[in-house]
Image: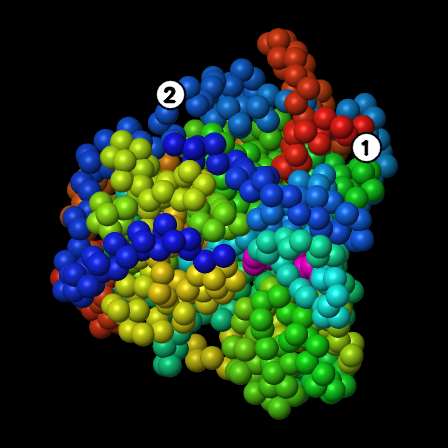
């Protein structure tokens, strides 16, 4: 079993070496590595430009070109395999303008966002933001929804945003798309989406101490008693719907 | 890179057994779950925690004699990064009411609640604000808030059972009782939980739980929570100062016996700074990047147990650090994604776990340690693992069957993040199964604390993965996002009240660092190890030989 030796952060089976250019400087690295592992193979130890290493934190936004090709390509360094002759740089940080506001006083009105970020309306629909997004978020569409006042659609369209900031680096209108869309999602989640009434009711029931006696009862159980309660507890079937009810109501209200 | 031919052949075996398995699932016929005795037996024989020789007794410190993994012992029996004689404590660089160490979910929620108590807060974090395991938590967060079928009492029983009845009861009490309020708090901050049209939270069952109470936001629940509360901190920048790339390397105590600040280290300028605070909250997170027993990890780049080291040097005992969690479903193919978390939500949604013959060998919803042990048994003793192209073995998670059980489009709607990630490598997870093997996931234990988040040092509070006790020897899915927010909020509030009412001014001291160093020497440990290590080192060993400045 080789899995226990799984700390293979660098080259393993891939022995074919290919050239890549990190900020213009050539390094030969094993084919098949991610850009991140290739940079480590080359000798870099990251402080910036490396985060979760799982494609969700937005620390390792990378732009690159290929010889003989005018196009700009983007990648998350931790998710993308190296290609021969790619020349790349990471953009670990890009200045962006965050406008603070009191969220508790923020209403569901789209004007809340328009007021904080009037540069929204400088958008010329060039679509550079969408094209550079390493998560394939339809950034320009999401921004258009904000302009149109459709916060719900803006929120859903931008849900997979990892806030790497690459859109902002390319924006002709100089807007911080990811802060704007964060505000849109928060307004949707907290002001527009219907509230979970059952949750608020549960909070109150617990605060009123309605479960306190039953909680004390299980906390006082010795291990054998607790094991018995655990083994005998009724299990909700996997495919049960919202209307499923248990037969055993011992620890319900 | 899609699946190579050899694996495509093996996927056909999975497809052959699928129709019958789907029928059984629809009929509610499951592979029987293990009894408590069967669980104990398989853990004993196959779980990495139980392998002899992988732990050693600590020779020094407040938990001297307690055996932990060598990787933990190595960083606890190590030199400080600083020489206290060279730190001028009379030159205070920053002064604040509450100092929060760590910018993940625990630290960030603590900062918000401390601010609400009127405290001036400084949040110092090693990388960027939000760079933490919180960001990577995918599946969801547990809360018993559907009282017609559920209660915090059942949540309590499930959690105790998942932890093999070793969890600290008071911590579990608080964890379960406060859970609905945490959901409420997040909802009111604008977190986009998945809901039914009437506002009822969508919930899922999860391994080891008796009720469907896993609340989620797609398959990026942790990221959604993290970016929401981080944005809220940015809204309160008048009162909360965030210092990035500035990890703490030692706590500062004072002559009143209280915790009174920390020495921070600017990783970019390589200079230190002294922070004086009336209360300190340790929220530095986990330890996956120590690669216990050489396992790959799902953890963030910065998960190096810094807080455990600092608190231990200052005199706080350890709890439950003898166990670590191996998540059963770490990605092992494609290799670029190796170690990456495959959310438990696949198993929670009912995806079967299969061996090379396409057969089920374990119920897919056993607690994580039991499930991991069963995978290891299948790939070792039983020899029925699925061989990868790199000589490793794993087992299948049959994701495509979910579309057949729950309806076409379920996989892409419920797992948008994973669909995209694997799509980049030419794998359609709604058509092809996932290949997995256990991966190092969570630090079950850590430093000892109470359900008020107090530690044995007045003025030092703690929250989140850095602490030990709430999950005993094994954590259940969705209880860690809950843990960081329940205890983050409590720590923030209590630390701010302490700062206002109980903190006493005193002379700052790093004497405990000197004392620890003497203890090291007295028991004959001479080492060049330095901790906290702050970052793992993945540079090529041959290249490292050539480095001039190491």
| Image position, residue B37 (x, y; %) | 19, 34
Asked whether residue B455 is in view, the answer is no
- Judged by its main secondary structure, the magenta piece is loop
Q: Which mark is residue B89?
A: 1
- Front residue of this view, candidates B48 and A253: B48
Q: Are callouts 1 and 2 both on one chain? A: yes
Q: Would residue B208 be found to the left or right of residue B491 on screen?
A: left
Asked whether residue B540 is in view, the answer is yes
Look at 54% across and 78% down and name the residue there: A157
Which region of the structure is painted magenta?
A55-63
Residue picked out by circle 2: B52
| Image position, residue B458 (x, y; %) | 60, 36
Tell me the SS state at disc 1.
loop
Tell me the CA gap for discs 1 and 2.
45 Å
Tell me the SS state at disc 2.
loop
Q: Residues within 10 Å of mark 2 (few under 14, many from 20)?
A: few
Look at 30% across and 69% down and name the residue there: B403
Look at 38% across and 32% down and name the residue there: A1
- Front residue of this view, candidates B456 and A186: A186
Q: Residues within 10 Å of mark 1 (few under 14, many from 20)?
A: some
Question: The disc numbered 1 marks a residue on which chain?
Answer: B
Q: Nearer the viewer, mark 1 or mark 2?
A: 2
Q: Would residue B482 be found to the left or right of residue B160 on screen?
A: right
Q: Quadrant of residue B413?
A: bottom left
| Image position, residue A124 (x, y; %) | 74, 87
Q: Is residue A161 above or below residue B389?
A: below
């Amino acid at each position: 079993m080789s899995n226990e030796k799984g700390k293979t952060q660098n080259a393993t089976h891939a022995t074919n070496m290919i050239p890549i250019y990190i900020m213009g400087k050539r390094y030969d690295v094993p084919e098949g590595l991610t850009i991140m592992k290739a940079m480590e193979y080359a000798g870099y130890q990251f402080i910036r430009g490396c985060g979760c290493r799982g494609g969700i934190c937005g620390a390792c936004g990378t732009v690159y070109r290929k010889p003989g090709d005018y196009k700009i390509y983007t990648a998350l360094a931790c998710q993308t395999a190296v290609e021969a002759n790619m020349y790349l740089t990471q953009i670990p940080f890009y200045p962006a303008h965050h406008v603070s506001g009191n969220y508790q006083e923020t209403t569901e009105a789209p004007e809340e966002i328009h007021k904080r970020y009037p540069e929204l309306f400088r958008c010329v629909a060039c679509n550079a933001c969408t094209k550079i997004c390493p998560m394939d978020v339809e950034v320009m569409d999401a921004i258009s929804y904000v302009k149109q006042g459709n916060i719900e659609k803006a929120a859903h369209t931008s849900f997979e945003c990892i806030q790497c900031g690459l859109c902002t680096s390319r924006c002709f209108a100089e807007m911080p798309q990811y802060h704007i869309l964060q505000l849109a999602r928060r307004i949707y989640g907290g002001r527009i989406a219907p509230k979970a009434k059952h949750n608020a009711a549960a909070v109150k029931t617990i605060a009123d101490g309605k479960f306190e006696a039953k909680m004390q009862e299980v906390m006082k159980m010795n291990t054998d008693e607790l094991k018995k309660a655990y083994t005998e507890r009724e299990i909700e079937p996997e495919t049960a719907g919202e209307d499923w009810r248990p037969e055993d109501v011992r620890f319900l209200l | 890179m899609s699946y190579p031919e050899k694996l495509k052949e093996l996927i056909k075996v999975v497809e052959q057994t699928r129709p019958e398995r789907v029928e059984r699932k629809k009929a509610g016929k499951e592979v029987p779950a293990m009894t408590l005795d069967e669980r104990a037996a398989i853990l004993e024989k196959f779980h990495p925690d139980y392998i002899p020789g992988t732990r050693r007794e600590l020779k020094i410190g407040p938990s001297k004699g307690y055996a932990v993994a060598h990787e933990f012992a190595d960083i606890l029996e190590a030199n400080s990064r600083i020489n206290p004689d060279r730190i001028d404590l009379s030159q205070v660089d920053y002064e604040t009411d509450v100092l929060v160490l760590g910018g993940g979910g625990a630290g960030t929620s603590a900062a918000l609640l401390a601010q609400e108590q009127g405290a001036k807060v400084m949040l110092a974090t090693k990388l960027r604000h939000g760079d933490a395991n919180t960001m990577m938590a995918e599946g969801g967060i547990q809360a018993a808030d559907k009282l017609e079928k559920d209660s915090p009492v059942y949540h309590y029983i499930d959690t105790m059972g998942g932890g093999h009845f070793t969890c600290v009861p008071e911590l579990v009490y608080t964890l379960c009782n406060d859970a609905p309020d945490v959901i409420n708090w997040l909802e009111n901050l604008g977190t986009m939980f998945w809901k039914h049209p009437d506002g009822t939270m969508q919930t899922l069952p999860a391994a080891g739980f008796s009720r469907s109470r896993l609340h989620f936001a797609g398959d990026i629940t942790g990221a959604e929570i993290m970016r929401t509360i981080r944005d809220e901190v940015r809204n309160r920048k008048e009162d909360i100062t965030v210092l990035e790339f500035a990890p703490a390397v030692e706590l500062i105590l004072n002559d009143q016996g209280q915790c009174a600040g920390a020495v921070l280290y600017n990783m970019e300028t390589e200079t230190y700074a002294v922070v004086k605070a009336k209360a300190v909250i340790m929220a530095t997170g986990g330890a996956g990047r120590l690669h216990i027993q050489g396992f790959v990890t799902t953890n963030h780049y910065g998960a190096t147990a810094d807080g455990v080291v600092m608190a231990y040097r200052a005199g706080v005992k350890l709890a439950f650090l003898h166990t670590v969690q191996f998540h059963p479903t770490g990605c092992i193919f494609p290799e670029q994604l190796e170690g990456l978390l495959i959310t438990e939500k696949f198993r929670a949604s009912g995806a079967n776990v299969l061996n090379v013959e396409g057969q089920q060998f374990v119920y897919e919803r056993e607690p994580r340690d039991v499930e991991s042990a069963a995978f290891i048994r299948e790939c070792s003793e039983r020899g029925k693992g699925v061989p990868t192209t790199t000589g490793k073995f794993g087992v299948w998670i049959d994701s495509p069957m979910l579309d057949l059980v729950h309806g076409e489009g379920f996989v892409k709607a419920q797992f948008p993040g994973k669909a995209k990630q694997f799509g980049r490598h030419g794998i359609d997870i709604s058509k092809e199964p996932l290949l997995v093997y256990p991966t190092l996931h969570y630090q079950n234990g850590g430093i000892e604390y109470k359900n008020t988040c107090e530690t044995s040092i007045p003025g030092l509070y703690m929250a989140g993965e850095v602490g030990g006790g709430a999950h005993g020897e094994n954590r259940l899915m969705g209880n860690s996002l809950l843990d960081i927010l329940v205890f983050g909020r409590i720590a923030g509030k209590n630390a701010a009240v302490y700062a206002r009412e109980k903190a006493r001014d005193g002379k700052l001291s790093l004497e405990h660092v000197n004392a620890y160093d003497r203890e090291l020497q007295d028991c004959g440990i001479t080492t060049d190890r330095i901790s906290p290590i702050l970052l793992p080192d993945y540079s090529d060993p041959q290249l490292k030989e050539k480095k001039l400045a190491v």
